[in-house]
Image: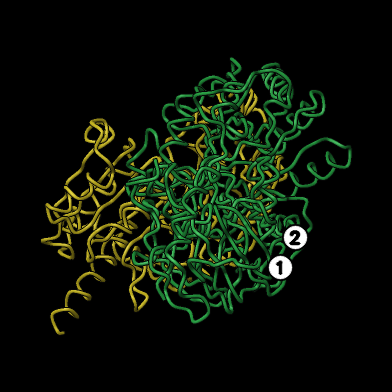
Amino acid sequence: MPPPNIQLDDHGHLKHFLTLEGLSRELLIKILDKTEGFLGVARQAVKKVPLCRGKTVANLFFETSTRTRTTFELAAKRLSADVLTLNIAASSTSKGETLLDTLRNLEAMHVDMFVVRHAESGAAHFIAQHVAPGVSVINAGDGRHSHPTQGMLDMFTIRRHKGDFGPLTVAIVGDILHSRVARSQLAALRTLGAGEVRIIAPRTLLPAEPESLGARVFHDLRAGVRDADVVIMLRLQRERMRGAMLPSEHEYFQLFGLTEERLATAKPDAIVMHPGPINRGVEMDSQVADGPRSVILEQVSNGIAVRMAVMALCIGTQNRLAQADSHD
Amino acid sequence: MTEATPSTAPSATPSTGTAAGKATSTAASKASIIASATTAPGIPPESPPELAPAIALGNTSGIPPAIAPGLVASRVSIRHGRLIDPANGIDDLLDLHLADGKVLAVGEAPPGFEPERVLDATGQVVCPGLIDLCARLREPGQEHKGTIASETAAAAAAGITSLCCPPDTMPIIDTPAVAQLITRTAALAGKARVVPAGALTQGLAGEQLSEMATLRQAGCAVMCQAESPIINTLVLRRAMEYAATFGLTVIMRPENPFLRDNGCAHEGRVSAHLGLPGIPEAAETVALARDLEVAKQTGARVHFRALSCARSLEKLAAAQARGIAVSADVSAHQLILTEDDLEGFNSQCHLNPPLRTAADRDALREAVRTGLVTAVCSDHQPHEPDAKLAPFPSTAPGMAALETLLPLLLRLVAAGVLDLPTAIARLTCGPAAILGLPLGNLAPGRAADVCVFDPEAKWRVGPKTWLSQGRNTPFWGERFKGRVTWTLLGGQIVHERRL
C-alpha cells in the first residue's frame, strides 16, 4: 500500500515539490512546458512577472550551496516574491535548535514557501509533513535522496536539444550511490520514457540493486557512452577517497574521466552535461567541459526558469485552495 | 510484614460474579496470607550464595520476585477456557487452579479447594504469562522515554509477566547495585518480573570482563553486550569462556560496526531509491559467523538476538547441525513489516536491525514455525515524541512494542503462518528456556503467571488503549484482533480488562 503522495492536492495539483518519484508524465511535461514560457523572462528589459507578488519565500539552506541557492533566489525575485535566504548551517542548529523549532519560528513569520536544502535524505518530506496547511515546500536537495529541480532542469535541457525522449540513450557517469541528482534524473527519465538509460561507475559508487533504478549498469566508460545521445557526468566528492571508495583521483580519471577521445564513441551530436561544480581533470577534461558539445552553462540558465515554473505551480495551487476555502 | 502494603490488584478483593464461584469464606481468604513468602523465591540480595561451581550459580532458583513481599496471594480458578501450555503439550478445555502464587491443579479442582475468585474464560485462551526476551524500560537513566512502572504496566496489559531488560541503561547494568535497583523497583511496581541482563563487558566497552558471577548473584539471568560491539575478538573469546565457566548464557546482537557504518535502512531496493545509507546483510552475517566460531571454540551457550535476514538463519541452522549450543530470537515486527514500509520516510519504521526484504521476512516466519528460532521478542524501545521528529536518518531507531507483541503473532496465526500453540510456545517456554528460568510453564507447582486473552476481541491502537509511555509505533491507529483479558502474576491479578 503506497502512502498517499503528499506532493499533490486532492485534484492532483502540485502542492509541494519533493521528489520526481510518483509524479505523472503529464505533470512533468506540464512543468517543462511552463519552463519554456519562463525562459523569455530573462530576456525582457524588466526581468519580472507578478505571479508571486505579495508572497514570501524562505530559502533554508542547511547545507552550503552557491548555484542552487542563487538560482532559487533569482527565480523567486523574478516572480516578484519577497525572498529571505537563511544559511542555517551556520546559525540556529549550531545552537542546538531542532529542525522543527527552526521551522516553527519561520512559520510564525508567515512564510508562504520554504525552499529547503538539507544534508539528510528525507528532510524535505519531514518538513512538508509538518508545515502549516497552505505552505509549500520545495526540495533543493536532501541528502542522497532527491534534487527534483535539478532533475527537471536537466530534462528541460535534454528536451531543448533532442526533442522526444523515446529514442534517446542517456548515460550517467560517476558517483550514483551518493548522488541525489542522479536519483532525480533516473526517476524523470523513467517517467518520460527515455529509450535506454545507463549508469556507469565502479561498484563502490553504485547503490544496492542499481537495476531497480531503471538503468543498465556499466563499469566501462567506453562501452557505456557508446552511441549515447546524452552523457551526464556527476560530481565526485573528495571524501570518497577517504572512505575507501576509490584509490585515487588519478585512477578515477583514468577509468571514468570523460575526454574527447572517449566521447568519440558517443553519437556525433551527443551533448555533455554536469550539475556543477566541476572538478576539472577528475570527472572530465577541460576540453570537454568547455567544448562544443558541453551544455553545462545552459543548464544553469535553464535552472532559473525551471525553478520559476515549479514555484509558480505551487503558489497557483495555494491560491486555488485559498479561493476554494473562501467560497465555503 | 503481613499488613498495610496496598494491594496492587484491587480487583482481587470482591469476587466479581460469575455464577460458578462466588461465596468464598473470609476465613479462607485470611488463611492464604501465609503463602506470600513462596511467591518470591529469588536469591535474597543480602545473602549471596557461595561462589564456586557452576551449579551454585545455576539457573534453577533465579526467578526475579514478582511483587514486593507482604502482598496477599489469593486462590483463583480460571474456568472454561482453552488452556494452551506448550511446555506440557496441553491444548484442551481445562480449568486452571492457582493458590499461594503457584499453579495448584490443572483440570479438576482438588477436593475442598475454595477459590476466592473465579474467572470465567469461556471462549478465551488461557496460557502461561508471556516472556519477553528484550524490552527496554528506560529506567534508570532515560525516564523521559519510559519508567519501570509505566512499561511494566504496559507489559501486564499485554499479557507479559516476565521481561528481560538489556544492560544499556544509564548507568549500565555492570554492577550489582544497578541490577538490584531494577529488580526492586520492578517488585515495588508489582506488574511484571523484570530480569536484568548483565553487561558482558564493563561499561559495555568491549574491553574488560564484567563481574559476571557477582551480577548473576544480583539477579542477572544472562549476560549481554546490548548494541555495543566487541571489536577485539580476543576479549570476546575470554568473555565467552568466563561466562561458560559459570554456565551463564551470553546474548549477542550480531552486528559488525564497520559494515553497519552510518546505515539506517536495509541496503537494497528501497534504500537505493530513498537515498538512505544502507546496512548490508553482511553487517549481521559477518558478526554472526565470528560469534558462532568463538562460541564453538569456547563452548559457551550463546543466544543471538533479533536476527533479521535469511542468510543468518542458514548460518544458525548449520551451526546447530554442528552441535554448537546456540539459539536465536526474532523481533515480532520483523515477521510483519518489510523495507517497503519505509516509503515516505516513515521514521516509525527506523529500526535496528533494519526491516529487510519480503523474502527475509518469509524466511524468519518459517524459522519461527519450524523452531529454528525458539523465541519471539518485542524489542520494545519506547521513545519520547521528539526522538522521531526529525529527518529519517536523525531519528532514534526502535519502536514501542510490548502491547503489539501478542497481537502481531495472532495476526500470523490468522494468516495461517503459525498455529496458535506454536505462537504461544515462542512467547512462553521458548524464551523461558533461553533465560534458564522455570517460567512459561503451567505444571502444578510452577509460578502462577498466567495470560488469559480473547482471540476474537477487536481493538485499535490509540490513546485509549495504549499504556506504554512511548507511542512510537508504526501500528498506531491500526486495528488488531485478540486482546488480553486478565494477566496474573504470581497468582495476583495485575491486569483486568473491563468488559
Describe the element under mark 1 as helix, strand or loop. loop
Assess disc 2: are there few (<14), some (14-19) or many (≥20) residues with their C-alpha within 10 Å of its C-alpha.
some
Q: Is residue A29 visible?
A: no
Q: Residue B392: give x, y in percent of width and height.
A: 43, 48
Q: Is residue A86 toward the left or the right of residue B172 in the image?
A: left
**Image marks 2 and 1: residues in contact by CB distance under 8 Å:** yes
Tell which chain the image draws in green: B
Instruction: Report, in whole angstroms, how far the alpha carbon at label 2 lies from the one at label 1.
Output: 7 Å
> In the rendered image, which quarter is residue A117 located in?
top left
Residue A248 percent coordinates (x, y): 61, 22
Amino acid type shown at disc 2:
Arg
Numbered badge on residue B417: 1
Residue indicated by mark 2: B369
- Residue A46: image quadrant is bottom left
Q: In the figure, what tint was chain A given?
A: yellow
At x 58%, y 18%, the residue is: B211
**Label 2 residue SS:** helix
User: Residue under mark 1: which chain is it in?
Assistant: B
Give how far across and how far down residue B154 sits, in percent. 43, 55
Towards the viewer: B174 or A73: B174
Residue at x 40%, y 58% (from the top left corner)? B9
Above or below, comparing residue A183 to residue A289 in the picture = below
In the image, what residue type sits under mark 1?
Answer: Val
Compared to residue A268, the image places residue A160 above or below, namely below
